[in-house]
Image: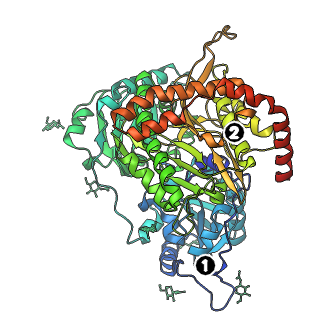
């Protein structure tokens, strides 16, 4: 959950509560942050001395006669997670947070970041840097116009700017009489002598058993979409790393958490060009890619660094290049004449990748079965060890990662595990560290949001737990989050519905008592690809829901200074069985493929409807049927017993008895909540 570029940021800020202002640093940390007004300045040991890299960068700027240089925190593919060698902003500023943009002039240096990172920035930056407490480009532009006189030039690396970001800078800056200069040699790279080398490990073929179709089939499907498009594009240009990885069934490990390799693809009717470090492609993979021929189903391997020139050359002809605006950088956009561009928010590859075929669905389900085993092992372990007082947020995070690592086809975690106890969980974006870690105890709620990469699928699950006696508020809030999760999962909706129009169903049980959460309700997910797979999800900029898509469903509730709740499952969009079919298209619904029981202690069935309880009982039966045999097969008897105990159906008897007191109970609970939350 660490966004680094704008389209993810825009999306994830909302997903992670930035907009709701949920983030406050947990404690007073004055003594560990810098003080630049005292003389001499007070600098904690965590600060990085940036004088040398700044003066080297300014020398480069002087050579090029530019007055300012902009340094974003992304890579040339707008990746969500970036490799160390792409952490240019961090190298220049010392600030390690995932979001934030730096600007250097001849006399000043400034960093813009959002409230999640202010304390971290004050701890890590020296007094060369001013901190601008806002993430917005408009604020950067305003500052630049103040610092840079008309007629002077501001430099930037076009490969680190999305087209939208570039527009946000370019329009106000050029209309105010300053110039923007696109410099393809990155100036930070030039001065960064200790920059980690480019990855050199082999790029590998994902075994046929783990892929939904061959690369030839995928290529044909994209080509037929090109033919069918009324604008008759002659080629598709792919910039996002998961596009080329998916299209060719290739994987690498250039990026943390995502099995990707640096690449671009230019796919026309007549040729396929894969821009990559060619020496990383073994002879076997070359054979697999048909590189030794020159037909429309032969892949030409071309050096990664030639992509810009090659695309420029290609666009000299009578061509039309189809690009996805969300992922293409200005570096490629600027070399294509505008009349030769076909722009869409998403490339056809993004759209094809979003809809999983039968085999991909099966693979995804299988990975979730083994993932459930690892998570259940973890829950059993917590139940035994938390009361002993020996578990903290960090040790538990690494333990759940290690359990996944033991499952078949495991390829590491799919993101940095969020393991958060008590008030730490109220920060929806929290990630544990040795500094902030809390011990897990029977007195606090605990939130675990984690996932795995497996050769057959990517997983993402959140469970919230309590091993002691939850308060009435904790229990009601948890139950309402669960009710929202169930209501959205079971919702039947017309095909092509936008997720944005569906997601309020997950909020309704919370809204009813004046509660809410400040993040999005879910995101797409890949088959051994991205944990946050664009463009599926419940935000306004996601594509409509279609059969075969996978999305997370993850409502939550965050009680500042107290606790945090999130219940997240991955679900598949399937056809619903409806009596009628107005509109002629099958209606859709979801099917949860995450198969791990919820915390019985936190569920208050007296506020749930019979439909919700029925769903829960059916879901638990499915878990028993599917995960039970897998636990037995893995000889995990203790876990099997735990599973049976934790999937006991909520009996109608129980329901009947408690329903009697339902009215008064809910009334009391509501009064209580209103009191507490005012
Ligand atoms: C920084 O130091 C100055 C002078 O010692 C002091 O007045 C000021 O309160 C300090 N600021 C912070 C934020 O601690
Ligand atoms: C930072 O490093 C430079 C040398 O690169 C040195 O001259 C300067 O004194 C250092 N600044 C601080 C605050 O330590
Ligand atoms: C540098 O840029 C300024 C305007 O920003 C211009 O007046 C000057 O001639 C340029 N110098 C060189 C050496 O290009
Ligand atoms: C390309 O990969 C090889 C290893 O196969 C490595 O030695 C080389 O440094 C890489 N070059 C670039 C420019 O990435
Ligand atoms: C490609 O063809 C050449 C000559 O035809 C041959 O020497 C080479 O081994 C072939 N490479 C692959 C990967 O098949
Ligand atoms: C682009 O075209 C020029 C002239 O036709 C040629 O010299 C150059 O090698 C081409 N570059 C690439 C990357 O194909
Ligand atoms: C946290 O502390 C443990 C134990 O002291 C240590 O092994 C680990 O490397 C530390 N982790 C980080 C990220 O500093």
* Location of residue 642 with respect to 153 vertically, above or below: above
Give the x, y percent position of residue 246.
40, 35
Compared across the picture, whether 514 is left or right of 581 comes to right
The answer to which quarter of the image holds residue 491 is top right
Asked if one can make out residue 490 in the rendered structure from this viewpoint, the answer is no
Mark identifier at residue 217: none
Query: How would you rate the neighbour count of disc 2 (Cα within 10 Å): few for under 14, some for 14-19, many for 20 or more?
Result: many
Q: Residue at x 39, y 29 (%)?
A: 629
* Location of residue 508 with respect to 464 vertically, above or below: above
The answer to which quarter of the image holds residue 136 is bottom right
Q: CA distance from mark 2 to mark 1?
A: 40 Å
Residue bearing mark 2: 479
Count how many numbered circles sit on residues in the image. Answer: 2
Question: Circle 2 — which element?
Answer: helix
Give the x, y percent position of residue 666.
82, 37
The answer to which quarter of the image holds residue 27 is bottom right
Residue bearing mark 1: 32
Q: Is mark 1 within 8 Å of ligand 1?
A: no
Q: Residue at x 52, y 62 (%)?
A: 389
């Amino acid at each position: 959950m660490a966004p680094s570029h704008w389209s993810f940021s825009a999306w994830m800020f909302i997903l992670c509560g930035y907009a709701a202002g949920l983030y406050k640093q947990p404690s007073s940390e004055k003594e560990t942050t810098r003080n630049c007004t005292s003389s001499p300045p007070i600098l904690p040991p965590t600060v990085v001395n940036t004088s040398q890299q700044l003066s080297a960068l300014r020398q480069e700027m002087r050579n090029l006669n530019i007055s300012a240089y902009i340094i974003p925190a992304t890579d040339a593919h707008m990746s969500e997670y970036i490799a160390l060698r792409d952490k240019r902003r961090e190298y220049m500023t010392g600030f390690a947070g995932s979001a934030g943009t730096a600007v250097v002039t001849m006399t000043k240096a400034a960093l813009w970041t959002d409230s999640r990172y202010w304390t971290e920035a004050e701890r890590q930056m020296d007094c060369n840097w001013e901190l601008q407490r806002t993430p917005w480009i408009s604020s950067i532009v305003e500052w630049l116009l103040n610092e840079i006189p008309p007629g002077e030039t501001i430099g930037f690396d076009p490969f680190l700017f999305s087209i939208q970001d570039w527009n946000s800078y370019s329009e106000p800056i050029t209309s105010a009489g300053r110039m923007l200069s696109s410099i393809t040699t990155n100036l930070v790279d030039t001065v960064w002598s200790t920059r980690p080398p480019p990855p050199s490990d082999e790029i590998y073929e994902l075994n046929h058993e783990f892929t939904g179709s061959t690369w030839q089939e995928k290529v044909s499907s994209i080509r037929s979409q090109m033919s069918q498009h009324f604008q008759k594009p002659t080629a598709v240009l792919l910039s996002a790393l998961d596009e080329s990885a998916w299209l060719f069934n290739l994987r690498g490990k250039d990026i943390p958490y995502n099995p990707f390799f640096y690449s671009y693809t230019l796919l026309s009717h007549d040729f396929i060009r894969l821009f990559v470090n060619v020496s990383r492609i073994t002879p076997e993979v070359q054979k697999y890619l048909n590189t030794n021929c020159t037909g429309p189903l032969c892949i030409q391997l071309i050096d990664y660094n030639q992509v810009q020139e090659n695309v420029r050359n290609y666009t000299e002809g009578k061509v039309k290049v189809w690009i996805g605006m969300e992922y293409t950088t200005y570096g490629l956009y600027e070399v294509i004449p505008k009349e030769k561009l076909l722009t869409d928010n998403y490339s056809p590859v993004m759209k094809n990748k979003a809809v999983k075929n039968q085999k991909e669905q099966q693979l995804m389900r299988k990975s979730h079965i083994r993932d459930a085993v690892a998570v259940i092992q973890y829950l059993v372990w917590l139940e035994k060890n938390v009361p002993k007082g020996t578990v903290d947020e960090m040790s538990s995070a690494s333990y759940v990662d290690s359990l996944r690592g033991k499952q078949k086809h495991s390829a590491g975690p799919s993101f940095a595990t969020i393991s958060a106890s008590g008030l730490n969980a109220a920060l929806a974006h929290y990630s544990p560290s040795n500094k902030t870690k809390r011990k897990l105890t029977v007195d606090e709620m605990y939130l675990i949001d984690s996932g795995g990469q497996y050769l057959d699928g990517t997983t993402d699950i959140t469970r919230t737990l309590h091993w002691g006696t939850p308060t009435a508020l904790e229990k009601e809030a948890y139950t309402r989050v669960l009710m929202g999760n169930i209501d959205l999962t079971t919702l039947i909706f017309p095909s092509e519905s936008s997720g944005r129009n569906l997601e309020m169903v997950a909020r309704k049980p919370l809204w009813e008592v004046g509660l809410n959460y400040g993040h999005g309700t879910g995101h797409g997910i890949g088959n051994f690809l991205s944990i946050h797979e664009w463009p599926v999800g419940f935000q306004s900029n996601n594509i409509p829901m279609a059969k075969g898509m996978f999305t997370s469903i993850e409502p939550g509730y965050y009680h500042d200074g107290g606790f945090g709740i999130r219940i997240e499952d991955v679900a598949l969009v399937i056809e619903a069985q409806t009596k009628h079919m107005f509109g002629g298209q099958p209606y859709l619904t979801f099917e949860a493929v995450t198969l791990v029981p919820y915390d019985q202690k936190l569920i208050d069935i007296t506020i749930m409807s019979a439909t919700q309880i029925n769903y829960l009982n059916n879901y638990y039966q499915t878990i028993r049927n599917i995960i039970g045999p897998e636990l037995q097969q893995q000889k995990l008897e203790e876990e099997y017993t735990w599973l049976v105990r934790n999937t006991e159906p909520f009996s109608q008897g129980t329901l009947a008895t408690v329903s009697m007191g339902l009215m008064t109970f809910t009334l009391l609970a509501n009064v209580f909540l209103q009191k507490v939350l005012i």
